[in-house]
Image (tube, coloured by chain):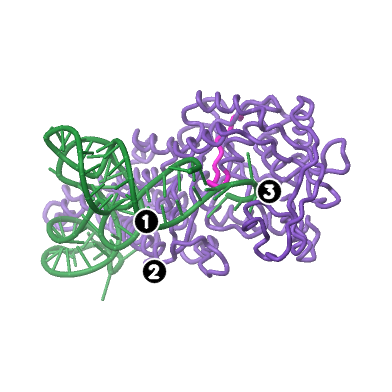
Amino acid sequence: MTDTNFYITTTLPYVNADPHLGFATEIVLADILARHWRVRGRAVFFNTGTDEHGLKIFRQAVAAGLSPQAYVNHYAESFRRLRSALNLSYDNFIRTTDEAHVVAAQEFWRRVAAAGHIYKKLYPIKYCVGCELEKTDSELEAGRCPLHPAQEIEVREEENYFFKFSSFQKQLLDWYNHTVDFVIPERRFGEIKNFVANGLQDFSVSRLRSKMPWGVPVPDDPEQVMYVWFDALVNYISAIGWPTDMAKFGEWWPVVQLAGKDNLRQQAAMWQAMLAAAGLPFSRQVVIHGFITSSGQKMSKSLGNVIDPLVLVNDFGTDAVRYFLARHVHPFEDSDVTREKFAEAYNANLANGLGNLVSRLMRMTIDYGVRLPAESQKQFVFSEEEQKFLERYEVNRVLDKIWARVGELDLKIQTTQPFVLIKTDPERAKKDVAWCVGELWQIASALEPFLPATAATVQQAISSHAMPPPLFPRK
RNA sequence: CGCGGGGUAGAGAAGCAGUAACUCGAGAGGCUCAUAACCUCUAGGCGCCGGUGCAAUUCCGGCCCCCGCAACCA
């Protein structure tokens, strides 16, 4: 990534369910950042896609009576639908089952192995005979499977490949200490420094093919497939041409990665160590956001509090959803979202705020015959403050600023009262309205990365001197 | 003493030593260009107990309560 180029990526969601609001938030944030940099004149490469290998998918496909490929095709499609639903401007949609990605993952493995960072060892796994499943420690309660507490957990040995994560501790810490803003926000950076400083354990990067065939084959070992994480993370480089198109790779790397807090380790430590092991530079930045809860609880089907982003889009419109996710979901902290909160923000800020402002101003503009000069319809720059917020990923603060301007404009109309003056001092009234329309143009321009369609509608109304349809009807 | 984050008006959310922003919601006025919209005013708050300071929401100590993580998972 050069000074003029900007490479941003979301994490690749695992395709074992339809897209949820959390991922929608992440990808909308990425889209806003991408659009904003384009406005500011940088070339942008915006990547997203789907993570499609692994045991969970394999099992669910089998349970659904589908081939894994058919199963992931179905979900990849459902994630692709987000593009139009949320008006996303990504440049690339990578699937980890894409041939080019599979080849890249294998090449990546070869390089890491050739550098001596992968080894094979026997690995004890905890197995619940009742479930017929391997269990992680966090799934066990008091050393027993919560579903089959009467049965002993069996320890079985399996031979897997391991990645020498532990040898990268010093390199990671050095990097962290020399890169002030590598992980954002700072609190998360502290967490990962702490984690790495406390010591790293090598992790398993393959699975027995006989147990789990749905993965990228390990080069030169027909018995094993890559563990899903190892292959999926490589997408960040395979998406920009590594290893076949190194010119393209050099143009865009390193990347700014967005991820949820559950992904901190994988993105900020494991993946960085993998890059180092392959002799590649670290990422530029890892931005960690929070989770979305609903009524104080994690969204889950059994609680019935799941909010489907596509339903919101259907009921309120694309820009309304983008608006809400960008301003009313905190960029870094967990946020509680309910349909009520959404509707409240919609009515207060979109219908009564922006939408109403456009109506009242356009009415006067047209009735009084006020036109915004063409040259005023060109210049736009984000204020320094707005730029700073965007660079810190605080998109909510930028919207706060923009909505403050909406409020000021409403106030301006109230104080100057052009609708009264038009009867006694029409010149004065028209001048005031002209100023207001100029400001409205600026507001619309600032809104472009956030609400692209709305921004265009407002600008179109101003330049064509025509009343737009109500932007956000009250609900 | 496993690690970490946090408790600011009904809700969300800034500030982090010197009259406690802002948004929504509530109450009372005003206006008429507008999507029963808009403007003004009002009520209401720093979890608890100590300490340091001229001054503490802000620093220090203790307590209480939430919430993550602890190697599957946005």
| Span shown in magenta | A253-263
Colour used to depict chain A in the structure image: purple
Spatial CA span between label 2 and label 1? 24 Å
Q: Is A238 in front, or is A460?
A: A238
Residue drawn at x 34%, y 43% as measured from the top left: A442
Q: Earlier in the sequence, mark 3 or mark 2?
A: 3
Q: Is residue A284 left or right of residue A241?
A: left
Q: Which residue is mark 1?
A: A466
Q: Which residue is mark 2?
A: A475
Q: Is residue A449 left or right of residue A376?
A: right
Q: Which chain is green?
A: B
- Residue A401 seen anywhere in this rendered image of the structure: no
The amino acid on which the numbered mark 1 sits, given as a three-letter code, is: Ala
Q: Are marks 3 and 2 on the same chain?
A: yes
User: Regarding mark 3 in the picture, which secondary structure is present there?
Assistant: loop
**Residue A82 placement (x, y as % from top left):** 59, 55
**Residue A127 placement (x, y as % from top left):** 75, 55
